[in-house]
Structures are given as C-alpha cells and as structure tokens.
C-alpha cells in the first residue's frame, strides 16, 4: 500500500479503518461475512490489504504503529504530526 502527500493523514486513516472496520479517510473497509476478515482498499487505487483474522489485524496495527509512531501511540503521533504541519 502506498502513502501519498500528507503521509501522516493516510497512515492514521488506514489505522482507523482497520480498527473501526468502517471506511475512514481514503480507505474503504469491507468485512468478509464468512471469516470476519477485513479487506482494506484505497479509494485512489493501488494495492488492497486483506487481514484474514483478528491476530493478523492486531499484528499489522502493531507494525504500522512501530513503523511510524516511535514511542507514541497512534493518536498521540497523529496529533503531534498535525501540530507540526500547522507550524510549517
């Protein structure tokens, strides 16, 4: 999955779409009625992400948080990034 422009908003939107199981920002989230997995698709095209179990979902969210947020949680990191963008 590729991030664009204001990367921090895309990262946060992806995180929120996965956690909530609902569309968020530029990401659409569809649930598999059979196994409960989630299919995440960017509205701007690109690769889809299929999370087939709650364990896969938790693992991906952890990777996303570790990869972008450092020692902060996702909400704290997003808030920090918003404030830094306003200061520019």
Image (spheres, rainbow, N blue to C red):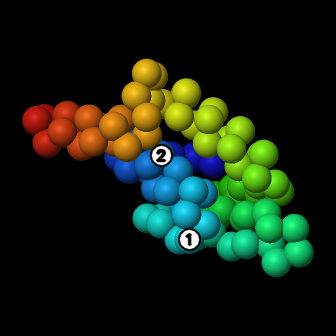
Residue for badge 2: 11
- Sequence order check, earlier mark of 2 and 1: 2
Q: Image check: 17 left or right of 33?
A: left
User: Which residue is outermost to the top?
Assistant: 71
Is 30 placed above or below 47 here?
below
**From the viewer's perspective, is the residue at label 2 or at label 1 nearer?**
1
Percent of width and height locating residue 79: 27, 42
Tell me: 23 left or right of 61: left
> At x 53% / y 71%, what residue is drawn?
23
Residue 30 falls left or right of residue 84: right
Provide the residue designation for mark 1: 22
Q: Percent from the top left, x then y, of residue 40?
A: 66, 62
The one of 31 and 55 positioned closer to us in this rendering:
55
Residue drawn at x 33%, y 37% is 76
Q: CA distance from mark 2 to mark 1?
A: 15 Å
Q: Quadrant of the C terminus?
A: top left
């Amino acid at each position: 999955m590729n991030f664009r422009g204001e990367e921090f908003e895309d990262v946060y939107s992806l995180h929120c779409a996965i956690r909530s199981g609902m569309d968020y920002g530029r990401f659409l989230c569809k649930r598999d009625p059979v196994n409960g997995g989630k299919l995440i698709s960017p509205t701007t095209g690109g690769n889809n992400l299929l999370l087939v179990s709650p364990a896969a979902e938790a693992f991906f969210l952890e990777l996303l948080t570790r990869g972008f947020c450092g020692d902060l949680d996702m909400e704290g990191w997003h808030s920090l990034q918003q404030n830094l963008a306003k200061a520019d």
